[in-house]
């Protein structure tokens, strides 16, 4: 349970394991339920592009997300893949929502083992493909 008192649904871990091990999902979007008691799976997809994934992030509310990010470095090393955890907290979201998501982040983060990178986004430029590619293709643990 998080500092905010928000729990993490078992479905969160199950969906993450399916993405990580079975490659059954390309991304998962998580939200805090309407009663503000639990982090739940809002949506998952198996074949959508990164651009399609970005359309799932609301312009005026917070979300957590996981994306199985594939990329090539261009030096004949082939495709690489990293699982990225997103904390989406747009500037236009309410202060209450931003605070709730910020104080609940550790709870979901602890249940998701195997995250290669973490991206904090407050506007779409921070989660644009090129921004994410720059971060994951150079950081430690690039493999």
Image: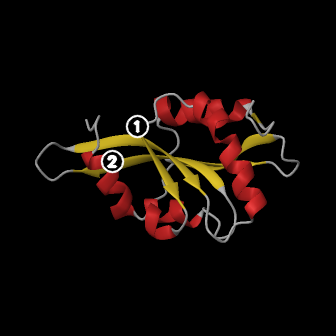
Residue at 19% x, 44% y is: 78
In the rendered image, the residue lying farthest to the right is 35
Residue at 33% x, 47% y is: 136
Q: Is residue 84 left or right of residue 2?
A: left
The residue nearer to you, when weighing 77 against 48, is 77
Quadrant of the rendered image containing residue 12: top right
Q: Is residue 131 left or right of residue 108?
A: left
Disc 2 marks which residue? 136
Disc 1 marks which residue? 116
Q: Which mark sits nearer the N-terminus, 2 or 1? A: 1
Location of residue 103 in the rendering, given as x and y in whole percent from the top left corner: 70, 43
Residue at 73% x, 34% y is: 2
Q: Quadrant of the C terminus?
A: top left
The answer to whether residue 112 is above or below residue 50 is: above
The residue nearer to you, when weighing 16 against 115, is 115
Disc 2 packing (10 Å; few <14; some 14–19; many ≥20):
many
Helix, strand or loop at label 1? It is loop
The residue nearer to you, when weighing 110 against 70, is 110
What mark, if any, has residue 32 been given in the picture?
none
Helix, strand or loop at label 2? It is helix
Q: How many marks?
A: 2
Location of residue 23 in the rendering, given as x and y in whole percent from the top left corner: 47, 37
| Measured Cα–Cα span from mark 2 to mark 1 | 8 Å
Mark 2–mark 1 contact, CB under 8 Å?
yes
């Amino acid at each position: 349970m998080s500092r905010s008192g928000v729990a993490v649904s078992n479905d969160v871990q199950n969906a993450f394991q399916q993405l990580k091990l079975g490659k059954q999902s390309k991304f998962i979007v998580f939200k805090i339920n309407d009663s503000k008691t639990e982090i739940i799976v809002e949506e998952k997809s198996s074949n959508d592009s990164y651009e399609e994934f970005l359309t799932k992030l609301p312009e005026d509310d917070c979300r957590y997300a996981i994306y199985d990010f594939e990329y090539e470095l261009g030096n004949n090393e082939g495709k690489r893949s990293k699982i990225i955890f997103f904390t989406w907290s747009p500037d236009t979201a309410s202060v209450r929502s931003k605070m709730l998501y910020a104080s609940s982040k550790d709870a979901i983060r602890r249940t998701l083992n195997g995250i290669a990178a973490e991206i904090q986004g407050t506007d779409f430029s921070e989660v644009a493909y090129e921004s994410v590619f720059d971060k994951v293709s150079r950081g430690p643990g690039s493999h």
